[in-house]
Amino acid sequence: MQGVMEANLSSFKIILGSSSEARRKVLSEMGYEFTIMSADIDEKAIRKEKPEELVVALAEAKAEAILGRLSIDDFKKDAEPTLLITSDQVVIYEGVVREKPGSKEEARQFIKDYSGGHAATLGSVLVTNLKTGFRKGEWDRVEIYFHEIPDEVIDKLIEEGDVLYVAGGLLIENPLILPYVKEVVGTTDSVMGLPKALTEKLLKEAILGAMDN
């Protein structure tokens, strides 16, 4: 396996702070075993002027919520460090930030807007070392261009319902929408909510960075 596991680092445990099936899939593809905890936060209560600041702040709030439910002293005593991964994502359309649709009607309008057009995903990853307290987060942006999406395809996507639970109602990995994706400037795993390269980089820094301090 590439990345952190090849770096001859000490063994470590991972907690994925997300209930997202897509993020679970991506982290599994990376070859990691992990446990799952979800953060129950009011995302609408956190507002920032810039979308880059927003997604990082939301990932930090999720980390804080999960840390509040854990006995951190136990993790500090463990021989093996535990790394907590939290993340967040928004879609940007014509300069406007889009989070999860509030209704089927809003999801339908979102997808109609993308038809024959362009949107971007902006996602953050934050890794916290529970043993040392070291924390590092960054963001990743992907540009997505679409062909015209037929109304019947949009209807099927709404009927399936998965688009209601993702930022901007955007699911480019869905078999229904995939044929209408014209170009992706960036990586599909980032659009799914967990950019692999960035996650690997932050996991490594959370281990080695703590050693350098």
Image (spheres, helix red, strand yellow):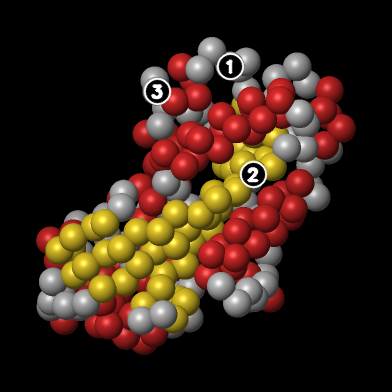
Marks 3 and 2 sit apart, C-alpha to C-alpha, by: 21 Å
Marks 1 and 2 sit apart, C-alpha to C-alpha, by: 18 Å
Residue 20 seen in this snapshot: yes
Mark 3, residue position: 2
Tell me the amino acid under the disc marked 2.
Answer: Lys
Q: Please provide percent x and percent y for residue 25.
A: 40, 42
- Estimate how packed mark 2 is, as few (under 14), some (14 to 19) or many (20 or more) residues with alpha carbons within 10 Å: some
Mark 1, residue position: 9
Mark 2, residue position: 136
Tell me the amino acid under the disc marked 1.
Answer: Leu
Q: Is residue 87 above or below residue 73?
A: below
Residue 24 seen in this snapshot: no
> From the viewer's perspective, is 24 left or right of 145?
right
Q: Indicate the quadrant where residue 8 lies.
A: top right
Which of labels 3 and 2 is toward the front?
A: 2
> From the viewer's perspective, is 10 left or right of 110?
right
- Estimate how packed mark 3 is, as few (under 14), some (14 to 19) or many (20 or more) residues with alpha carbons within 10 Å: few
Nearest the viewer among 33 and 147 is 147
- Estimate how packed mark 1 is, as few (under 14), some (14 to 19) or many (20 or more) residues with alpha carbons within 10 Å: few
Q: Indicate the quadrant where residue 47 lies.
A: bottom right
Q: Indicate the quadrant where residue 28 lies.
A: top left
Disc with the residue nearer the chain's start (3 vs 1): 3
Marks 3 and 1 sit apart, C-alpha to C-alpha, by: 12 Å
